[in-house]
């Protein structure tokens, strides 16, 4: 499993001001996901995040020098479900923790489509339930590049409340 790297200077961040405009893959008709902190899929994800999980990206919120949030996202392919995991930095313990945050049945859903739509669903959940604003920058790319991450964020935070 890829460990997230916390950038310590702007030169370590991926290019964010200029990026390609990306069209997101369409949402499959039967994409019935669940999203929220600690969600458990019908398959029940493992207690520990699998080392075989695919790294999606890392984003950061920085509201003040003493108030920030780092989230790295991973997608785990289970026998019957895709599970999205958040690996977040816990300042209290000084280590990375993790939590299952969304899942969807895997049948007929490709990895990239699952990554895009589960991340979208979780960010919508986080925006509505926790009043989380848009992240401040992308720390790392994984299977999703900055353009795709920005397109998902645009769909979540630039859409009218509804």
Image (cartoon, grey):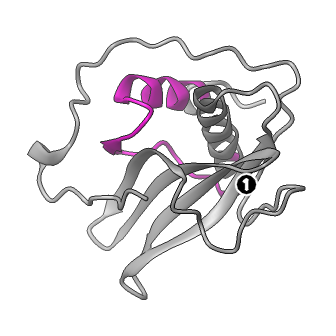
Residue in the image at 23% along x and 19% along y: 18
Residue in the image at 34% along x and 59% along y: 4
* Residue 15 position by quadrant: top left
Q: Secondary structure at mark 1?
A: helix
The residue lying toward the viewer, choosing from 160 and 52, is: 52
Image quarter (top left, top right, bottom left or bottom right) of the C terminus: top right
The residue lying toward the viewer, choosing from 130 and 87, is: 87
Viewed as shown, does residue 15 lie left or right of 30?
A: left
Looking at the picture, how far across and down is residue 7, in whole percent? Answer: 20, 56
Looking at the picture, how far across and down is residue 90, in whole percent? Answer: 44, 77
Residue in the image at 52% along x and 11% along y: 23
The number of numbered discs placed on residues in the rendered structure image is: 1
Image quarter (top left, top right, bottom left or bottom right) of the N terminus: bottom left
Residue in the image at 44% along x and 32% along y: 144
Looking at the picture, how far across and down is residue 55, in whole percent? Answer: 46, 47
> Is 146 part of what is drawn in magenta?
yes
Name the residue beneath numbered marker 1: 129
* Residue 42 position by quadrant: bottom right
Viewed as shown, does residue 130 lie left or right of 92?
A: right
- Against 21, residue 149 (above or below) is below
Q: Which residues are magenta?
A: 128-155
Category of crowding for the residue at label 1, using alpha-carbon neighbours closer than 10 angstroms: few (below 14), some (14–19), many (at least 20): few
Q: Residue furthest bottom?
A: 93
């Amino acid at each position: 499993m890829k460990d997230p790297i916390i950038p310590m200077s702007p030169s370590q961040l991926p290019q964010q001001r200029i990026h390609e405009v990306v069209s997101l893959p369409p949402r499959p008709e039967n994409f019935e996901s669940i999203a929220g902190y600690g969600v458990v899929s019908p398959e029940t994800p493992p207690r520990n995040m699998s080392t075989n999980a695919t790294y999606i990206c890392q984003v950061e919120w920085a509201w003040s020098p003493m108030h920030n949030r780092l989230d790295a996202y991973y997608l785990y392919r289970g026998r019957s479900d895709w599970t999205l995991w958040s690996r977040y930095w816990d300042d209290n313990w000084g280590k990375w923790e993790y939590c299952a945050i969304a899942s969807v049945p895997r049948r007929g859903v490709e990895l990239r489509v699952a990554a895009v739509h589960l991340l979208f669903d979780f960010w919508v959940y986080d925006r509505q339930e926790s009043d989380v604003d848009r992240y401040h920058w992308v720390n790392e790319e994984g299977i999703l590049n900055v353009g795709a991450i920005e397109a998902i964020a645009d769909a979540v935070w630039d859409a009218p409340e509804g």
